[in-house]
């Protein structure tokens, strides 16, 4: 699968749930390529912005879309990576949002 | 403390600043933004893509990062004595006097 196919597949699945790709297409494709790279090296699409352990069970919470996406989008309008945003966020055309790490540090098991 | 600065840097337009070290992930969009920003500002910096290290190297580096950023998130940016967590351009500019 290439990034374009992944884009279409995810868009179809996520938009009806209220999760939109960031309006910055270059950022989105860069992150989708990173997800494919992680799928290749780890066997699953670990969040590109977090250090994955390589063990699927330990990284369950950060497999994209991660479990932190919903609270991050509710609070900040964007997920940690900036891949997914709310419709309002995309339309607001504001500055890039800094989303702090919500994953508890003890979850990072290597 | 001014390190790693020489005549060649001055000729290339690189400005004098405290040493800059960035702990990054090769796949992380924020880390890439920080590297791009520092390059655009002609700031000389060292970086380490932690995800590309071997597991032994990684353990030691993670301990290093956790000492300054307990969440061990990326990018973790060290400018002189100052630590900036995340790609925060305004803060980076302030600390570097850009």
Image (tube, rainbow, N blue to C red):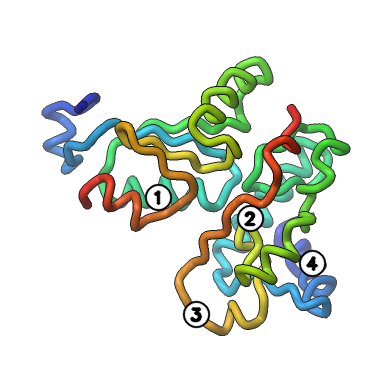
From mark 4 to mark 2, how far is it between C-alphas? Answer: 13 Å
The picture places residue B77, in percent across and down from the top left corner, at 42, 39
Numbered disc 4: secondary structure: helix
The chain letter under disc 2 is A
CB contact under 8 Å: marks 1 and 3: no
Q: Is residue A96 above or below residue B4?
A: below
Across and down, in percent, residue B30 comes to 52, 51
| Residue linked to disc 2 | A31
Give residue B97's position: percent from left, percent from top. 21, 49
Q: Is residue A103 left or right of residue B50?
A: right
Q: Are marks 4 and 1 on the same chain?
A: no
Instruction: Look at mark 1 in the image and give the residue it sits on.
Output: B36
Q: Which mark is residue A93?
A: 3
- Label 4 belongs to which residue? A10
Which of these two is toward me, A8 or A76?
A76
Q: Which residue is most to the top? A: B56
């Amino acid at each position: 699968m290439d990034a374009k196919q992944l884009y279409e597949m995810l868009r179809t699945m996520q938009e009806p749930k209220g999760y939109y790709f960031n309006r910055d297409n270059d950022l989105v494709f860069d992150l989708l390529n990173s997800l494919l790279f992680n799928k290749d090296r780890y066997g699953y699409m670990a969040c590109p912005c977090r250090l994955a352990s390589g063990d699927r069970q330990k990284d369950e919470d950060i497999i994209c879309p991660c479990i932190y996406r919903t609270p991050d989008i509710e609070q900040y309008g964007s997920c940690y990576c900036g891949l997914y945003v709310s419709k309002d966020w995309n339309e607001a055309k504001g500055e890039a949002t800094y989303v702090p790490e919500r994953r508890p540090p003890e979850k990072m098991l290597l | 403390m001014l390190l790693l600065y020489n005549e060649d840097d001055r000729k290339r337009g690189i400005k004098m600043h405290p040493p800059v070290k960035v702990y990054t992930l090769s796949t992380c969009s924020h880390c890439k933004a920080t590297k791009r920003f520092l390059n655009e500002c002609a700031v000389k910096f060292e970086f380490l893509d932690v995800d590309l290290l071997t597991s032994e190297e990684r353990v030691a580096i993670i301990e290093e990062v956790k000492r300054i950023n307990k969440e061990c998130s990326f990018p973790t940016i060290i400018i002189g004595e100052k630590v900036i967590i995340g790609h925060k351009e305004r803060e980076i500019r302030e600390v570097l006097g850009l």
